[in-house]
Image: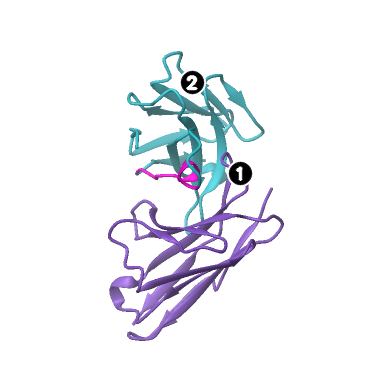
Chain colours: A purple, B cyan
Amino acid sequence: GAVVSQHPSWVICKSGTSVKIECRSLDFQATTMFWYRQFPKQSLMLMATSNEGSKATYEQGVEKDKFLINHASLTLSTLTVTSAHPEDSSFYICSASLSAYEQYFGPGTRLTVT
Amino acid sequence: DAKTTQPNSMESNEEEPVHLPCNHSTISGTDYIHWYRQLPSQGPEYVIHGLTSNVNNRMASLAIAEDRKSSTLILHRATLRDAAVYYCILRAGRSSGAGSYQLTFGKGTKLSVIP
């Protein structure tokens, strides 16, 4: 099956710093990628939809200036958490669509802000 | 978005079949029924999807009620590796660009497999 990777798999950063998370589709081209956030014992919450070559579409309540998304190529999307705070600590998961019927998820990135 | 209702948790004995139910009484005629599962500390994994007819693949079977208001994911022989949270998701079938690709996750069913 199609493979989506994320890097890093976990990161610890200090409050006020920025962190970049990469999401790559390894063996297919993805016009659309999605970013989710998952707090402990909760479900995945969609943060934004990322389309190659255009601006991301953010879900209601997600600050676009805080969570910067760049989808520069058909195989790479990045999420930058700017000026991170402890409440941003979470499990961030990306996914890439091979088609409307198939969406493949990355393994997730655990962010801890101290 | 049409919502789904699943039991919070279920238990199964190893090597026994498991039937995971999902209610989606407000499903529209063009909504697809998708199932994903998430193992601990991992991203979700696609399991199966269907529209009207029952579907089988190497992982599971999907039984869809005739009125499409409910469906059941069937794992034919549960293994310890099947312990996960299983999500039943409705996806819009209409052509609406990236929107038709969006998946809205509910709370899912946490499946425990007993050795």
Instruction: Give the quarter of the figure containing the C terminus of chain A.
Output: bottom left
Secondary structure of the residue carrying numbered label 2: strand
At which x and y percent is residue B86? 45, 41
Q: Nearer the viewer, residue A88 or B84?
A: A88
In what element is the residue under mark 1? Answer: loop
Q: Which residue is mark 2?
A: B64
Is there any visible trace of residue A103 in the rendered image? yes
The amino acid sitting under disc 2 is Ile
- Residue furthest to the right: A27
Asked which quadrant contains residue B109, the reply is top left
Q: Is residue B78 visible?
A: no
Looking at this rendering, what residue extends furthest in the front direction? Answer: A54
Chain name for mark 1 = A
- Circle 2 packing at 10 Å, graded few (<14), some (14-19), many (20+), is many
Question: Callout 1: 10 Å neighbours few (<14), some, many (20+)?
Answer: few
Query: Which residue matches tag 1?
Result: A99
Q: Nearer the viewer, residue B47 or A31?
A: A31
Tell me what residue is drawn at x 54 percent, y 42 percent. B82
Q: Which residues are magenta?
A: B98-106
Q: Amino acid at mark 1?
A: Ser
Protein chain holding label 2: B
Between B57 and A22, the one lying in front of the other is A22
Instruction: Find residue A66 and report its horizontal and vertical position in percent.
Output: 35, 74
Task: State the image coordinates of residue B94 (x, y, percent, origin top left).
Answer: 48, 33
Report the disc number at residue B6: none
